[in-house]
Amino acid sequence: DGWELARVARENSPDLPVVYISGASGHEWSALGVPNSLMITKPFAPAQVVVAVSSLLVASDSAS
């Protein structure tokens, strides 16, 4: 599932930005999502994805 995919991806690339998109399991994000990730619930506007990815990339640059 997406939760496990993100965990494995983060093991291989700790700075990888992770944005989850879900219509049904958004309530599980706080318990199952990887740290420093974001959740977007459906329905959403495409601009929300752009903002989410941009904010994670900026946060990643600031931490470097």
Image (spheres, rainbow, N blue to C red):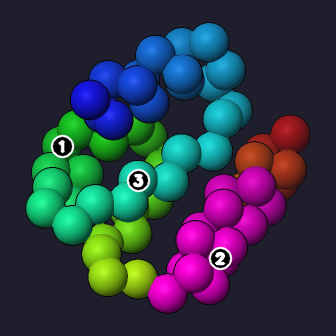
Q: Nearer the viewer, mark 1 or mark 3?
A: 3
Residue span colored magenta: 45-58
- Quadrant in which the N terminus is drawn: top left
Q: Kindly identify the residue that appears in the image at 15 percent across and 55 percent down.
A: 25
Across and down, in percent, residue 29 comes to 24, 51
Q: Is residue 34 left or right of residue 22?
A: right
Q: Secondary structure at mark 3?
A: strand
- One can see residue 54 in this view: yes
Across and down, in percent, residue 45 comes to 49, 87
Q: Secondary structure at mark 1?
A: helix
Q: Which mark is residue 11?
A: none
Q: Kindly identify the residue that appears in the image at 40 percent across and 37 percent down.
A: 34
Q: Which residue is mark 1?
A: 31
Q: Is 49 rendered above or below residue 10? A: below
Q: Which residue is mark 3?
A: 20
The alpha-carbon separation of the residues under discs 2 and 1 comes to 23 Å
- One can see residue 30 in this view: no
Q: Kindly identify the residue that appears in the image at 21 percent across and 67 percent down.
A: 23
Which amino acid is tagged 1? Ala
